[in-house]
Every structure is written in C-alpha cells, then in structure tokens.
Image: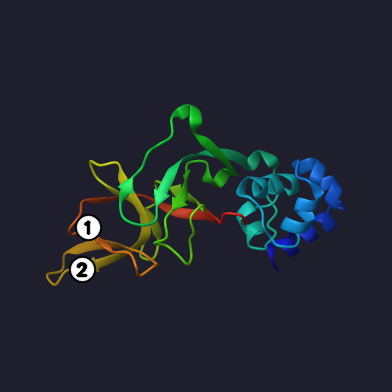
Amino acid sequence: MTFQDALRKLLADNKMTVNELAEKTGVKQPSISGGWLKKGSISTDKLFTLSKIFNVDAEALSEGRIEHLKPMSSFCTIPILSKIPAGPFSEIILDSLSDVEYLPVHCKFSKCFALRIDGKSMEPEYHKGDYIIIDPDLLPQNGNDVVGYIENYDKATFKRFRERYTNDGKLYFELYPLNSDYPTYSSLTMKIAIRGVKVAWFKEGK
C-alpha cells in the first residue's frame, strides 16, 4: 500500500470527504486531490497534521502503513536544531533560540532532536531536505546511521557507522557514505564523537 492508498483508506474509514479534509488542514482541495492523493507528494508538516487528524503514526503513514496511536496526548514537539551535512565534516550553525523550528512527533521521540539533511553523501537513500530524528542517548551499532562530531570543533556529518579492528586488535570505527563519491572517516585519524543515532526519518515532500 502506498501513502496515497493509506490516505484514501483513512478518508473512507472516517467517512471524510476531500473537502472536509481541506477544511481541517487548511490546504486547498486541488492540492490534496492532485498532490497528496494522486502524486503522494506532501510536506512533512502536513504529514504530521494528517497524523494528528487521524491519530496515526506519521512515519508509518508516509510508508503506506496505518498504525493507530493511543490518545492524542501522545504527540509532542522536538526542536529542529540545524542542517546536518551529508558530505564532508562541515560547520553546524545552530539557529538562535527565537528562530528554532519545532517538529511535531509521537512522544516516543520526546527526548530526541531533529536535523535537516544538507548534502549528497547519503544518496540514494537520503536526500537534501529530508528530516532525521536523532536519539542522543543510543549507543551506535554496526549499520546505524549516526551524527559524527569532531571534538572541540562545531563540525559534524551524517554517515553510516561500522566498527573495525586494526591488525593488532585495537577497536576503532568508521563513518562511511552511501555515495561512493565521498570519503570515509576513521576514528584512528580523526577525533570523532558520536552525538546520536537516527531513529526516524521523513522524506522531503513525502
């Protein structure tokens, strides 16, 4: 089932018309019919609006699955702290507190923070403009996608994590891209700290 199929089913199950959904979301009817229901194109903020209206999990809905949630109080917001480079280590400039955006999410992510991807090193899986939700308390495992941070510098990157051993048995880790045009970074040659593990992901326009 696609996102479009799931949305059609939610409308049918709730006996809601497209016009009624337009009123609830503040989106014009042609945008819902031609964009959401025909092309499956929806912004992240409106995806969360739908999740609140129908009380379903937003990430599952974006993937064409309907997972009903418990009471509406299970929703909260987390800060979108910055753009995270999916490329070389780059400076992260945090927005001022007055300019910080917030992402509405299920409260299972209440201790997390969100970042917006900027770069191509994690293509074709992740793309510029996608949102990732990061849990700062999780320890990385092989194959996790993580935020790596150069200690003593405000520079970070988004990469996949894997552990390695040297010939003499010393454990270290690498952060590697999904796009082979970009370099792999090693904790043997750079002082890298892991600042969090990706626990959810929302595609731009999906």
Amino acid of disc 2: Tyr
Q: Does residue 66 lie above or below 194 as drawn?
A: below
Residue 64's disc is none
Q: Is residue 77 left or right of residue 199?
A: right
Q: Are discs 1 and 2 less than 8 Å apart at CB?
A: no
Q: Residue at x 75, y 62 (%)?
A: 38
Q: Nearer the viewer, residue 88 or 1?
A: 88
CA neighbours of label 2 inside 10 A, class few (<14), some (14 to 19), many (20+):
few
Tell me where residue 30 appears, x and y as whole percent.
80, 52
Which label's residue is closer to the chain start, 1 or 2?
2
The residue at the point 69 percent across, 41 percent down is: 72
Q: Residues within 10 Å of mark 1 (few under 14, many from 20)?
A: some
In this view, 112 is above or below 141: above
Query: Which residue position holds label 1?
Result: 187
Describe the element under mark 2 as helix, strand or loop: strand
- Which residue is pictured at 25% across the width and 42% down the height? 153
Which numbered disc, 1 or 2, marks the residue closer to the eye?
1
Quadrant, the C terminus: bottom right
**As drawn, which residue projects farthest toward the bottom?**
167
Q: As displayed, is residue 77 above or below residue 34? A: above
Residue 104 visible = yes
**Picture quadrant where residue 186 is located:** bottom left
State the residue at coordinates (69%, 51%). 56
What residue is pinned by disc 2?
165
Q: The disc labelled 1 sits on which kind of residue?
A: Ser
Does residue 59 appear left or right of residue 136 in this picture? right
Q: Position of residue 96 (x, y in %)?
A: 43, 30
> At which x and y percent is residue 177?
36, 64
Mark 1 residue element: loop
